[in-house]
Amino acid sequence: MISTTAARRAYAGPALFSFGFRPFFFLGAIWSALVVPLWLFSYFHGGSAALTREWHIHEMIFGFLGAVIAGFLTTAVPNWTGRMPVIGAPLAGLVSLWVLGRVAMLFQDSLGPAAAVADSLFLLAFAAVIWREVLAGRNWRNLPVCGLITLFALSNVAFHLPVEAAADVGVRLALGAATLLIGLIGGRIVPSFTRNWMKSRSFAPEPSTFGTVDRVALGLTVVGAGLWVAAPQAPATGAALVLAGAAHFVRLARWRGWRAAAEPLVWILHLGYGWLGASLLLIGGASLDPDLVPRSAGIHALTAGAVGVMTLAVMTRATRGHTGRPLAADTGTTVIYLAINAAALLRVAATFAGASQPLLLTASGLVWSLAFGGFAVAYGRMLVLPRPSAA
């Protein structure tokens, strides 16, 4: 079998389908930039019956986040396993299933149960691809990733079930899987990229290596997320999540991100991981005292904060690295980093705002769209066009 690198070099089709990150990051960013303002307009002014709160929740989790996860893993897994990458026609087929799901969800009222079937195909097919590659490559270390992707796909199926409360359980299951993916994969790439940056500048001490603190943080997150899916309002759930959030902040401090303050491409990863710790503290606080901490505060610290910031951090870095650009943020990249953090702060603040909530919701949505729309504009050429020959 030829190597992963040789397979990519031998590919002669459209550049858009030469790497998984190219179509999924590009389309996911555009979709994310559109979904939020479409829903806000419908929410405040009335509009299409299809643009409901449930549609907004579904498309931001299973549409947008599903695309980014697919882009990252279809690019990373071949490097983990040494197997042939999913490129060309197979990749185009996966992308087509993702597009089919987005169209189906827009017309779900007309399509009925067929919309749920069409929407579920992408994540189930994607999970099958990841399982096939990891098992065939005997890459046992990443079996937990396969399990989390499967949970994510099944949570989408649960969302569509005609059973009372199934959608809420599906959302919590999906967000729990996303939380663990950030903790697991983010726990690898944040210290690794930080260490590489520090080494290039002879900075010391470098980020701490994986150890007991990391195991405790991940273990508490597994327990807390599991309890949250099963019993979101139980005191034990709140306690476990608060402990998990505190443990992630301890873990983050061991990576010494403040030493990389000069490079936005590095410090954005630390900010994104910090949002994970904050979201667990807030979700746990809502379980312990919902009168003090609104449930929505923690949910949006996780979705707009941890998910929004970490996805944009990974999307920019992976795009620059795999298309031969310097691993340093330019002005446009720094602007979208500031925008996504502002969007998250405004969205969390809106849950505490009372009469000012509509203003903060609108501001958050506009800045969110600026961040992801800005990514699509600034990085679109890198994603769609071939890698420069001189790079």
Image (cartoon, rainbow, N blue to C red):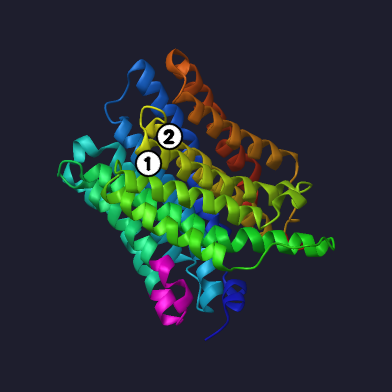
Residue 178 screen position, x and y as percent: 43, 53
User: Which residue carries the number 1 mark?
Assistant: 59
Name the side, left or right, on which 283 lies relative to 326.
left
Q: Quadrant of residue 57?
A: top left
Residue in the picture at 43% in, 57% down: 220
Residue 376 screen position, x and y as percent: 58, 42
Outermost residue on the top side: it is: 355
- Give the SS element for disc 1: helix
Residue in the picture at 73% in, 56% down: 325
Label 2 – label 1 distance at C-alpha: 7 Å
Mark 2 and mark 1 residues within 8 Å of each other at the beta carbon: yes
**Residue 369 bears which disc, if any?**
none
Q: Few, some or many C-alpha atoms within 10 Å of disc 2 (few <14, some 14-19, many ≥20)?
A: many
User: Which residue carries the number 2 mark?
Assistant: 35
Q: Is residue 222 visible?
A: yes
Q: Main secondary structure of the magenta part?
A: helix
Q: Few, some or many C-alpha atoms within 10 Å of disc 1 (few <14, some 14-19, many ≥20)?
A: many
Residue 143, magenta (yes or no): yes
Residue 312 screen position, x and y as percent: 58, 46
Magenta span: 132-146
Name the side, left or right, on which 368 lies relative to 113.
right
Residue in the picture at 36% in, 22% down: 43
- Give the SS element for disc 2: helix
Quadrant of the image containing the C terminus: bottom right
Residues 355 and 238: in front is 238
The relative height of residue 351 versus residue 186 in the rendered view (above or below) is above
Name the side, left or right, on which 364 lies relative to 92.
right
Residue in the picture at 67% in, 64% down: 208
